[in-house]
Image (cartoon, grey):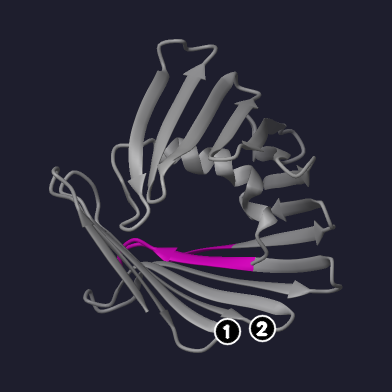
Amino acid sequence: MLLQGTFSSDQSVSAMGNMRWTPKWVTKTQTQIDPRSQNMLQIENEYNGDDFNASLKAINPSILDGGITGIMIADYMQSITPRLSVGLEGVWQRQSLGQKPETALSYAARYKSTDWIASAQLHATGTLGASYWRRLSEKVEAGVDCQLQFAPGPGGAGMFGNMRKEGQTTVGVKYNFATSVYRAQIDSTGKVGCVLEKRVAPAISFNFAAEIDQYKVSQSETLCGFIHADTLTRTRTNSVLVSRLKVLQKNSNSR
C-alpha cells in the first residue's frame, strides 16, 4: 500500500494512493482539491493477465443527483503474438442528469521489437495517431508522434462537403548522462521544448524546463524546480512540459 499527500501555499491539496490486492490486481486513486479550479477524483482498477491487460477508470463519479454522472473509461489490450498486441477503449461520460450520456470507442495496435516500438490509434472523433520510438544506443533514444484530425468542413461531410484535415508531428530525443537526463522536442507548429533533470544528491534532483513558440515568441516559458525523492514533491516545475516531452517514450513501458 502507498499513500501520499501534498499541501501547497495556494491552499490546494492533492493525494494519491495505490493498493495492490493481488500480484495482478491493483487499485489506484488520485484526488485534487484546488480553490481556483474544479476538484478531481479519479479511481482506477487495473488487472494484468498473462497475455492481456484490462482497466476500468472513473473520473469524478457521483450518484448524489439520483443517477450516475462523471466519466467512465474501460480499456482492454490483448497480445496476439509476443510482439503484436491490439486493444480498444470505451468512454462513457455525462456531466449532469439533464444531459444525455456521450460514448466513444477507440482502437489501438502496437508492435514491440527488441529496440523499437510502433503504435497506432484510431479515435471515434476522427483522430488518427501513430508513434514510433527507437533506442539508438545505450544512452540515446528518439521518437516521433503524428496526430491527424479529420473533421467535416464547410457544407458538412456529405456529397457536397469537404473534409478538413489537420495534423501535427512531434519529434523528440532523450539522452542519459551519468547523473542527469536531457530531453528535447520540436513539433510542426514551431514549438521547441527541452527539459534537463540533474541529480545533485542521492535524494534531490534539479529540473530545468524551457519552451518557446517560434511563431509566437511572446509565448515562451522557463521554469526550474527541485524534486525530493522521498516525498516526490515537485516545487513549481513545469509538469505539463515534462509530460509532453515524455509522451514519445510512453510506449517503451509495457502496460
Residue 187 part of the magenta-drawn span? no
Front in this rendered view, residue 16 or 227: 227
Q: What residue is disc 2 on?
A: 49
Q: Which mark is residue 254?
A: none
* Mark sitting earlier along the chain (2/1): 1
Task: Report the side of 186 relative to 95 (left or right).
Answer: right
The quadrant in which the C terminus is found is bottom right
Q: What residue is disc 1 on?
A: 24
Asked whether residue 156 appears in the rendered view, the answer is: no
Q: Is residue 98 above or below residue 7?
A: below
Q: Is residue 193 above or below residue 81?
A: above
Magenta stretch bounds:
89-104
- At label 1, the amino acid type is Lys
Asked whether residue 88 appears in the rendered view, the answer is: yes
Q: Position of residue 221 (x, y in %)?
A: 40, 22
Number of numbered discs visible in the structure rendering = 2
Question: What residue do we see at 72% from left, 60% from top?
Answer: 108
Q: For mark 2, does the 10 Å Cα neighbourhood hold few (<14), some (14 to 19), or many (20 or more) residues?
A: few
Q: Position of residue 126 (x, y in %)?
A: 66, 47
Residue 101 part of the magenta-drawn span? yes
